[in-house]
Image (spheres, rainbow, N blue to C red):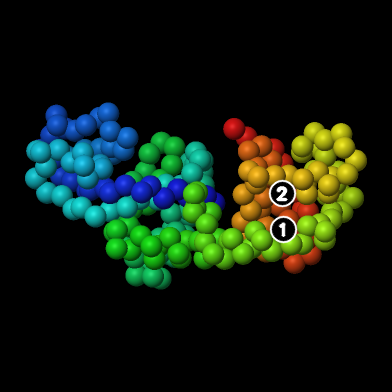
């Protein structure tokens, strides 16, 4: 699963009404009940009719559009961060979820998520960099099975007979992002994602990336 770290400061506010809320802001989450008018916004956009507020929050966004039938995504993340004694505040939109942590816990949260295999857009740990270099050093070991080759050809609509060479060229392309999660390497360009078993260097599959 991929997350994006939003490098902006957020505030959680209680407001008298929403007349002063900047709806043109990049991030603005409104929550109205019979008891309160709440707002989560960029700290710089906190309205002057705020009656209570808590500053110092940072956010991670779950990338992509989540299916409403998915179960346990937030529970898993909250459990991981709870082990680091990191409290979270969650805001959900139609498309996805935002996990907010206090600014002083951001680096620790990021480290834990990366260690557990979460891909953080725009972030790369030293371990992930080392993993990428290790794969590049083992490109001569790349291979696949006959069944794997047939699957890859079908997924990518390839006419070439040499699937391994095609994948090797993709992995060597300048825009290829390589990261390791669990037992596999994942190599993604702008249009193709390749999965390679890290111990055997077997190309398990490859598929087109949907825009």
Residue drawn where x is 62% and y is 49% of the image: 177
**Position of 160 compared to 96: left or right?**
right
SS state under label 2:
helix
Q: Which residue is mark 2?
A: 171
Which residue is more in the foreground, 153 or 5? 5
SS state under label 1:
helix
**Position of 29 compared to 96: left or right?**
left
- Picture layout, residue 120 above or below residue 127: above
Q: CA distance from mark 2 to mark 1?
A: 8 Å
- Picture layout, residue 198 above or below residue 21: below
Instruction: Please state the horizontal and vertical placement of residue 210, each as a whole percent of the image.
Output: 62, 35
Taking the image as drawn, is residue 181 in sight? Answer: no
Quadrant where the C terminus lies?
top right
Q: Which residue is mark 1?
A: 136
Instruction: Please state the horizontal and vertical placement of residue 188, each as a whole percent of the image.
Output: 65, 46
Which residue is more in the foreground, 108 or 83? 108
Q: How many marks?
A: 2
- Picture layout, residue 183 above or below residue 50: below
Disc with the residue nearer the chain's start (2 vs 1):
1
Residue drawn where x is 65% and y is 59% of the image: 132
Instruction: Count neighbours of disc 2 (C-alpha within 10 A) and say few if under 14, some if 14 to 19, many if 20 or more.
Output: many
Residue 92 — which label? none
Instruction: Count neighbours of disc 1 (C-alpha within 10 A) and say few if under 14, some if 14 to 19, many if 20 or more.
Output: some
Residue drawn where x is 25% and y is 37% of the image: 30
Which residue of the protein is positioned furthest toward the front in this rendering?
Answer: 174
Instruction: Please state the horizontal and vertical placement of residue 101, each as a whole percent of the image.
Output: 32, 57
Q: Are marks 2 and 1 in contact (CB under 8 Å)?
A: yes
Instruction: Please state the horizontal and vertical placement of residue 180, each as a whole percent of the image.
Output: 63, 59
């Amino acid at each position: 699963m991929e997350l994006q770290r939003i490098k902006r400061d957020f505030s959680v506010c209680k407001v008298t009404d929403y007349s002063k809320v900047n709806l043109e802001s990049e991030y603005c989450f409104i929550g109205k009940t019979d008891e309160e008018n709440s707002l989560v916004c960029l700290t710089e956009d906190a309205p002057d009719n705020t009656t209570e507020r808590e500053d110092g929050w940072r956010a991670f966004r779950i990338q992509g559009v989540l299916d409403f039938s998915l179960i346990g995504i937030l529970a898993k993340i909250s459990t991981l961060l709870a082990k680091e004694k990191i409290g979270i505040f969650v805001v959900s939109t139609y498309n996805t979820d935002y996990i907010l942590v206090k600014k002083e816990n951001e680096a620790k949260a990021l480290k834990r998520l990366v260690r557990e295999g979460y891909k953080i857009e725009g972030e790369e740990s030293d371990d992930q960099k080392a993993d990428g270099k290790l794969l590049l050093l083992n490109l001569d070991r790349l291979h696949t099975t006959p069944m794997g080759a047939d699957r890859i050809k079908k997924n990518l609509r390839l006419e070439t007979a040499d699937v391994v060479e095609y994948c090797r060229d993709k992995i060597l392309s300048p825009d290829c992002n390589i990261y390791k999660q669990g037992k596999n390497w994942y190599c993604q360009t702008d249009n193709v994602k390749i999965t390679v078993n890290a111990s055997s260097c077997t190309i398990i599959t490859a598929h087109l990336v949907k825009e």
